[in-house]
Image (spheres, rainbow, N blue to C red):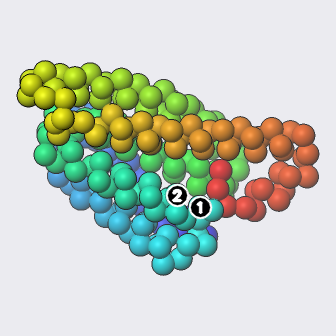
Amino acid sequence: MLHDIYNLLMLPVLCGFCFRYLLTGASFDAFVVVAYAYFIGDLLWVVCSPSCVKSPGVIAGHHCLTMLYMLYPLAYPQLRHYMAMCLSVELNTFFLILRRLWHVPPVSVCFYVTWITIRLIIYPYLIYVFAILYVDRSLETGSWLNSFALIPSFQSALTVLNIKWTVDLARRKLDMMRDPSLRARMSKAKGL
């Protein structure tokens, strides 16, 4: 519960900086500091208290991959906007946690709208964008082995994780439709 409160306090701050950057292009340095502070803090929490989340290994791996991935925009400013697009997913994480604690229709609507928009539309679309950037970089450098080579792979890995979580969510929903008594038990469980 305390971990959820940490997220409900930190994620709006992170999302505020994220959307400010997306809308204005301002304060990238502050955005990066807030993003790393959030991910490092959350990673330490999950490592020190693994029972605070359903899948601590997956969350820890996700946070490490994300922080590694976030190094690219530091070296290549043309990628900053894409980093903000990727980190907009934390708005959905906020609604996921809020929904778990306060399961009312408006929160659920926000949860599903952001889930579909960010995790299932924007993330896969960015694989395409990053593949084009990689090809452009390859043609520019004259080598297919260049600094952008890992970007489509990172984005693909995060997208696959989103698809896995979507399948898990859909399975839980189907199970609850088949057995309504599961709703009470699952509402007390951690996770999606």
Relative to residue 45, is residue 58 depicted above or below? Answer: above
Left or right side of 165 for 126: left
User: Considering the image in quadrants, where does the N terminus appear?
Assistant: bottom right
Residue 61 placed where, x, y %? Answer: 44, 58
Residue at x 62% of width, y 39% of height: 166
Secondary structure of the residue carrying tag 2 is: helix
Q: Inspect the image, locate mark 1, and give the three-letter code of the amino acid beneath it.
A: Ser
Relative to residue 117, is residue 17 depicted above or below? Answer: below
Q: Residue 55 has which mark?
A: 1
Labelled pair 2, 1 in contact (Cβ < 8 Å) = yes
Q: How crowded is mark 1: few (under 14 residues within 10 Å), some or many (20 or more)?
A: few
Secondary structure of the residue carrying tag 1 is: loop
Q: How far apart are marks 2 and 1 (CA)?
A: 5 Å
Q: Inspect the image, locate mark 2, and give the three-letter code of the amino acid beneath it.
A: Val
Residue 160 placed where, x, y %? Answer: 51, 38
Residue at x 44% of width, y 41% of height: 157
The answer, for residue 31, to whether it is visible in the render is no
Front one among 144 and 170: 144
| Quadrant assignment, res 185 | bottom right
Pointer 2: what residue? 58
Left or right side of 172 for 17: left
Residue at x 68% of width, y 42% of height: 169
Left or right side of 29 for 15: right
In this view, the residue farthest toward the left is 141
Q: How crowded is mark 2: few (under 14 residues within 10 Å), some or many (20 or more)?
A: few
Residue 115 placed where, x, y %? Answer: 55, 37
Front one among 35 and 61: 61
The answer, for residue 66, to whether it is visible in the render is yes
In this view, the residue farthest toward the bottom is 48
Residue at x 78% of width, y 56% of height: 186
